[in-house]
Amino acid sequence: MNINPKNILVIKWGALGDMVISTGAIRSVKETFPNACVVLLSNSLMKQIAPAGSIVDKLLVYDEKKYRGVKSITQLFKLILNLRRYKFDLAINLRWHSDRCAIIAYLSGAKERVSSGPQNMMNLYTTKVPFPNGRYHEVHRNLDIVKAVGVKVKDETPYTHISLSDEKFASDFLFQNKLEKENTICIHPGASKPIRAWSPDRFREISKKLVEQYDVTVIVTWSGKEKELAEFVVTENPKKMFLAPQTKTIGELAALIKYSKMCLTNCTGPMNVAVAVQTPTCAILGSSDPTDWAPYGEIHRTIKSPLVLESYTDEQEEQAMQDVSIEQVWSVVSKRWEELT
């Protein structure tokens, strides 16, 4: 693509992990075209991950799940009218599986439009990126799309915003409990669905072994309805295991993980937050395939369930996590801690 865009539209929304993992590509767009106005169209969760003025210039919020029926059509029409006012030169659709996003990219009025899907909508793009068949890391699915329009990628690492108040939240907690980063491990035992989380008693057993063998301190993070789960994990050794205060924002969670030497978690949104703040992470994967969803980067480690299937029912997904043994996790976590220290 031989253009020098003045206004660029980037489309991306989804769950926490999906959003965070796309930010390396989004940041690269702004770095390649620093004089362009980069407008990100996303859902409200992105206000915390990449607010306006961070890696994009403007953030437009469109929560599609809020609208149904006639209201959905009305809101979509208003959105299109708003987008066309920007006179976009380029639209980048990073939600390649959405018909609606393909249509939004086309109706935005952008002269150049790029994505890798959906396949039935490829005629709406001026630059068509081949969709990789089979297993392929989600980071690269995003990067391939932006690279196709001349974006130079200097840093593939995902990004998440941490405000000054988020930093203070974490540093105050560490100071009050006399914790030091070099001797602290963060454990996040929760997941988006209970069947995707490793057993809490096994997290507690790993925490106990870490304290006894390495004399580390463990902080257990939580949000929403996860308090009881987190409290269960810390009960084994309350003098060396600390229940973190509830993280009410993604930035607060990111700051706590950033102030830790290592992180242990499930394959969930917080895993990608840990990747974004570049804290070495050991991630437990049940049904997720490491080729697609392993924590991205050489500093991280993956613990994959021995139950490997092409697809999983809910029962098989739960079984996959149960099949991950304490010994399997301890082997990876203990070795990684020794490497880091």
Image (cartoon, grey):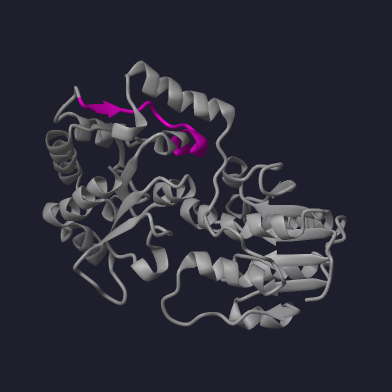
Magenta span of residues: 240-254
Above or below for 239 versus 247: above
Depth check: give the residue in front, 320 or 154: 154
Residue 147 in percent (x, y) is at: 65, 71
> Within the magenta stretch, is there residue 253?
yes
Residue 306 in percent (x, y) is at: 19, 68
- Residue 144 visible: yes
- Location of the C terminus (image quadrant): top left
User: Which residue appears at 42% of the width and 59% of the height?
Assistant: 297
User: Which residue appears at 49% of the width and 50% of the height?
Assistant: 16
Residue 13 in percent (x, y) is at: 59, 56
Give the side of residue 249 with respect to residue 8, left or right: left
Give the side of residue 37 with respect to residue 66, left or right: right
Above or below for 182 versus 157: above
User: Which residue appears at 62% of the width and 82% of the height?
Assistant: 120
- Residue 220 visible: no
- Extreme residue in the top direction: 176
Above or below for 249 versus 8: above
Task: State which quadrant residue 267 falls in.
Answer: bottom left
Residue 290 in percent (x, y) is at: 35, 67
Depth check: give the residue in front, 153 or 11: 153
Give the side of residue 159 with respect to residue 72, left or right: left
> Within the magenta stretch, is there residue 106?
no
- Location of the N terminus (image quadrant): bottom right
